[in-house]
Image (cartoon, helix red, strand yellow):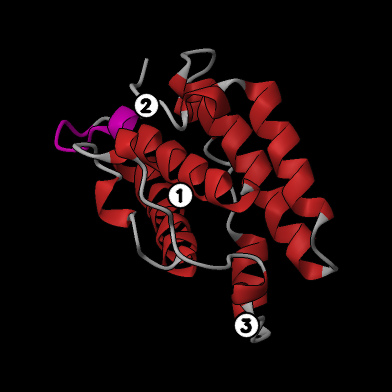
């Protein structure tokens, strides 16, 4: 099981995270809602992998960045979805997320999707290669998602 900064720990509970995704989605109009739904679905699949309820092999083809890519191609203003800077929190200090404190949430959103895209592209071809620690990569994507979700709930 992955370790989380205390500020994010409640979000790893599926029901809590999904409620927060729904609240975030309800604040948005149109296409932004579709992006949040995509993030929510990816979160569910990756959380099942992290909790060892299923293998990445079984869900990798369900994980998608299609909505994100579509919105990129349309010139969508992602700043309408990810606003402001990530707040500093004591529990982030000394973690892999500490570097995000004070940075723009929009950069976090793009980084998150870049990592998901890398997972989608590489895993089917390198899943058994020892140099890739897919469990760690899945957990890092989940941490970034929860950091963004926590930021948006404020």
In what element is the residue under mark 2? Answer: loop
Percent x, y of residue 93: 24, 39
Looking at the image, residue 47 lies above or below residue 52: below
How far apart are the alpha carbons under marks 3 and 2? Answer: 34 Å
Quarter of image, res 29: bottom right
> Looking at this view, is 29 or 129 the one in front?
29
Residue 127 makes an appearance in the image: no
How far apart are the alpha carbons under marks 1 and 3? Answer: 19 Å
Q: Which residues are magenta?
A: 129-136
Asked whether the beta carbons under mark 1 and mark 3 sit within 8 Å of each other, the answer is: no
Q: Residue at x 40, y 25 (%)?
A: 6
Q: Choose the circle earlier in sequence order: 3 or 2.
A: 2
Q: Residue at x 60, y 75 (%)?
A: 79
Q: Choose the circle earlier in sequence order: 1 or 3.
A: 3
Determine the main secondary structure of the stretch shown in magenta: loop
Q: Residue at x 70, y 23 (%)?
A: 15
Looking at the image, residue 82 lies above or below residue 122: below
Percent x, y of residue 77: 64, 81
Whether residue 133 is in magenta: the answer is yes
How far apart are the alpha carbons under marks 1 and 2? Answer: 24 Å
Q: Residue 132 bears which disc, if any? A: none
Whether residue 43 is in magenta: the answer is no
Percent x, y of residue 121: 41, 54
Give the residue number, with chain letter if any, for mark 1: 120
Answer few, some or many: residues within 10 Å of disc 2's Cα (few below 14, many 20 plus, some between 14 and 19): many
Give the residue number, with chain letter if any, for mark 3: 73
In what element is the residue under mark 1? Answer: helix
57 relative position to 68: left or right: left
Give the residue number, with chain letter if any, for mark 2: 4
In what element is the residue under mark 3? Answer: helix
> Looking at this view, is 88 or 43 the one in front?
88
């Amino acid at each position: 099981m992955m370790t989380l900064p205390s500020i994010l720990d409640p979000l790893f509970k599926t029901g809590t995270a999904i409620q927060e995704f729904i609240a975030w989605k309800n604040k948005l109009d149109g296409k932004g809602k579709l992006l949040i739904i995509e993030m929510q679905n990816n979160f569910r699949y990756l959380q099942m992998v992290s909790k060892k309820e299923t293998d990445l092999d079984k869900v990798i083809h369900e994980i998608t960045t299609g909505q994100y890519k579509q919105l990129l191609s349309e010139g969508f203003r992602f700043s309408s979805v990810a606003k402001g800077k990530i707040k500093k929190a004591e529990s982030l200090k000394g973690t892999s997320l500490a570097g995000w404190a004070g940075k723009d949430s929009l950069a976090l959103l793009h980084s998150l999707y870049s990592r998901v895209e890398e997972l989608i592209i590489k895993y089917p071809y390198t899943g058994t290669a020892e140099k890739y620690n897919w469990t760690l990569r899945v957990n890092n994507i989940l941490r970034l998602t929860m950091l963004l979700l926590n930021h948006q709930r404020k």
